[in-house]
Image (spheres, rainbow, N blue to C red):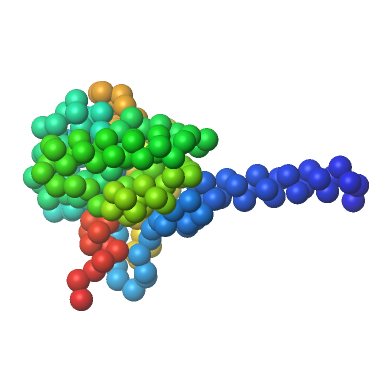
């Protein structure tokens, strides 16, 4: 192998390792993070990112039909725009997590920026619901320098996912197939009740997929829990 070929392979290996450190679901390079619970219980956590927005209420109504609890990772500016929807999510018994204040990609940002984004969202969500979130999910799954200290100071537990539905770009049938083929005991499913900071996005494929996924997993004997319940089950 030539020297240039070896250098190219080494560069590819470094790039791959760096990508995993930043976005790998099981990576703890920049901060501790959970992506599934231990197997052994037929329990699943259904999670939604990027709300609240008007479509969030349709998701909450659908979950109520099947008595399914979920965890909603909400964006601070969206909660500021729709505080009543954030309160409705909490009142329905769902868990609310911190998804940053403005939904940035944190790669190459300063630690002070990371902390400010999550601190502002934490204050916003606590003021609206009367309860501070205990979970966070990084936008795009991107963690960077500053996450570890920020999580410790704000008392936030990082959460990734076992399977992400790609529901912002796939039709409902493909979302269902992707999720069902990848999820198992202790899994954390990531879907989206919003689309970044858009105020009124079309999430109809997500809604249809949620119904299909819930019915499929209930038929297979699974039950749903919030992320906190899944990671810290009652003895």
Query: In the picture, residue 202 is in which quadrant?
Result: top left
Query: In the picture, residue 218 is in which quadrant?
Result: bottom left
Is 158 situated above or below 87? below
Q: Which one is nearer the viewer's eye here, 96 or 114?
A: 114
Q: Which one is nearer the viewer's eye here, 148 or 136?
A: 148
Q: Which one is nearer the viewer's eye here, 72 or 14?
A: 14
Query: Across the whole image, how many numbered discs are drawn on residues?
Result: 0
Image position, residue 67 (x, y; %): 13, 53
Name the side, left or right, on which 82 lies relative to 152: left
Residue furthest top as drawn = 199
Query: In the picture, residue 62 is in which quadrant?
Result: top left
Residue furthest left as drawn = 91
Which residue appears at 28% of the width and 53% of the height?
A: 155
Residue furthest bottom as drawn = 235
Which residue appears at 30% of the width and 24% of the height?
A: 198
Image position, residue 7 (x, y; %): 81, 45
Which residue appears at 62% of the width and 51% of the height?
A: 17
Is 76 situated above or below 6? above
Image position, residue 101 (x, y; %): 30, 33
Which residue appears at 40% of the width and 37% of the height?
A: 112
Look at the image and tell me whether residue 116 can be seen: yes
Q: Quadrant of the C terminus?
A: bottom left
Image position, residue 152 (x, y; %): 34, 54
Look at the image and tell me whether residue 173 can be seen: no
Q: Which one is nearer the viewer's eye here, 213 or 128?
A: 128
């Amino acid at each position: 192998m030539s020297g240039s070929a070896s250098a190219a392979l080494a560069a590819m290996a470094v790039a791959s390792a760096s990508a995993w450190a930043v976005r790998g679901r099981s990576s703890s390079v920049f901060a501790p993070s959970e992506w599934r619970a231990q197997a052994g219980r037929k329990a699943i956590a259904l999670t939604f990112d990027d709300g609240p927005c008007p479509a969030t209420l349709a998701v909450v109504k659908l979950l109520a039909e099947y008595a399914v609890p979920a965890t909603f990772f909400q964006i601070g500016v969206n909660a500021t725009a729709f505080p009543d929807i954030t309160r409705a999510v909490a009142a329905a018994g769902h868990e609310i997590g911190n998804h940053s204040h403005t939904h940035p990609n944190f790669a190459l940002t300063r630690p002070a920026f990371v902390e400010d984004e999550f601190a502002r969202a934490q204050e916003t969500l606590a003021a609206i619901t009367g309860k501070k979130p205990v979970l966070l999910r990084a936008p795009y799954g991107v963690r960077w320098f500053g996450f570890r200290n920020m999580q410790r100071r704000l008392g936030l537990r990082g959460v990734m996912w076992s399977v992400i539905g790609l529901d912002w770009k796939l039709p409902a049938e493909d979302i269902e197939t992707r999720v069902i083929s990848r999820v198992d005991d202790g899994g954390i499913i990531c879907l989206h009740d919003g689309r970044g900071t858009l105020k009124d996005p079309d999430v109809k494929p997500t809604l249809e997929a949620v119904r299909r996924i819930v019915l499929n997993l209930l038929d297979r004997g699974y039950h749903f829990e919030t992320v906190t319940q899944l990671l810290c089950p009652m003895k």
